[in-house]
Amino acid sequence: MNAIVELSDAHVVHKARSGGLFTRDRVYALTGADLSVAPGETVGVVGESGCGKSTLAKVLVGVVRPTSGTVSFQGRDLWSMPAAERRAAVGGSTGMIFQDPSTALNRRLPVRQILRDPLDVHDRGTKQQREDRVRELMSLVGLPRALADALPGQLSGGQRQRVAIARALALDPGLVVADEPTSALDVSVRAQILNLLLDLKERLGLALVFVSHDIQTVRRMSDRVITMYLGRIVEESPAAEVTERARHPYTRALFSATPGLLHPIDPIPLTGPVPSATRPPSGCPFRTRCWKADERCAADMPDFSVASSADHRFRCHHPVQEDESTRDLVRQSHPTEPS
Ligand SMILES: Nc1ncnc2c1ncn2[C@@H]1O[C@H](COP(=O)(O)OP(=O)(O)OP(=O)(O)O)[C@@H](O)[C@H]1O
């Protein structure tokens, strides 16, 4: 099936800042990302803070232009389109939901206008059709009509995130990218927002890219899980395989700490700090924290290898074996002291 969006060797390099001023350093926010999102699938993105999840999300929806590499929308190179065409392509195919709806919504506009804005900007339908669409969007996300004239400040956090979701859906996109959509919300409403996203995905046949620190939720919601480490995609796995059959040591370590495992185990420790994105280690960026690393890992970054299922790939010189349990890995990574 044709991908909605496809990244090929996408890199994002920022100028580093210190005390508000640019320095000579560069931040390698995204390095060599290849990723394709098919209609209707849910792709979860996990990794520690600063590993490039938001950057990947913004590149996918055309908010950040990659420093090099390509972003293709339905087979067409996004950044070689004329600006107006690019805006139309992005607006018509993708929607983005950000972490904090309080800052993502214009505080001075009522809900009705926030939802009309994308329709106005993209000149969709007649005035009446736009009004109908606003009503339809509100009902789609479970917002009572009485809130149409409310300002964001008069809504609860959950209602604001519903407005943000409705706005992302306004132009009927095939892909919605949600970057930590529940982390700014009270725990009590998180599940409602996640269920709403899943429900909309089913009803509208959306593809969903879901970025979260909450790896257990990512695993539950996704068809496929992408693991990122220091700007790189290091593994792409079917969600069903990610907890016990991930092949990259980093993915296994991340998921070993997941609460709610069927057979809880001691987590595989991730010792030491994440290296700086301005000076990533040579070779495999995870090697400085990996219990399996050797000289080869310092010398070069391996290409992707394919696991036993073709939709599972990983980049590692010393992958976890298919028959190795997470419990075995916990033993390897906590060598017992001789008594
Ligand atoms: N505009 C920018 N200028 C300079 N550096 C940036 C910029 N945007 C992101 N970065 C840096 O790029 C790296 C990746 O950032 P990104 O926000 O994509 O990570 P993340 O995994 O989403 O982090 P978090 O989980 O904390 O949101 C980080 O080192 C971050 O500091």
Image (tube, rainbow, N blue to C red):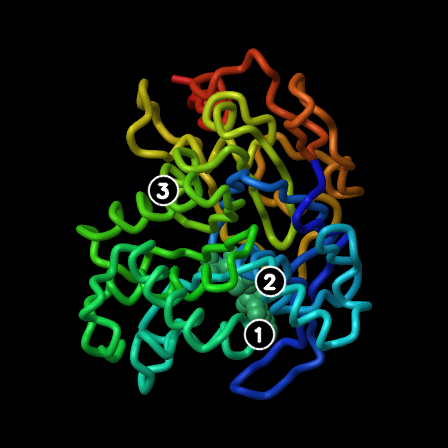
First along the sequence among labels 2 and 3: 2
Q: Nearer the viewer, residue 147 or 9?
A: 147
The amino acid type found where label 3 is placed reads Asp
Cβ atoms at labels 2 and 1 below 8 Å apart: yes
How far from the left and from the top, in percent, is residue 298? 74, 43
Which residue is denoted by mark 1 in the rendering?
A: 122
Query: Left or right of 195: which side holds 36?
Result: right
How far from the left and from the top, in percent, is residue 138? 31, 62
Q: Residue at x 77, y 67 (%)?
A: 79
Q: Nearer the viewer, residue 276 or 140?
A: 140
Q: Quadrant of residue 303?
A: top right
The local crowd at label 1, few if under 14, some if 14 to 19, many if 20 or more residues have their Cα within 10 Å, is: few
Q: Tell me, for residue 92, which label it has, or none.
A: 2
The amino acid type found where label 2 is placed reads Gly
Q: Tell me, for residue 199, which label it has, or none.
A: 3
In this rendering, is residue 8 above or below 320? Answer: below
First along the sequence among labels 3 and 1: 1
Query: Left or right of 322: which side holds 83?
Result: right
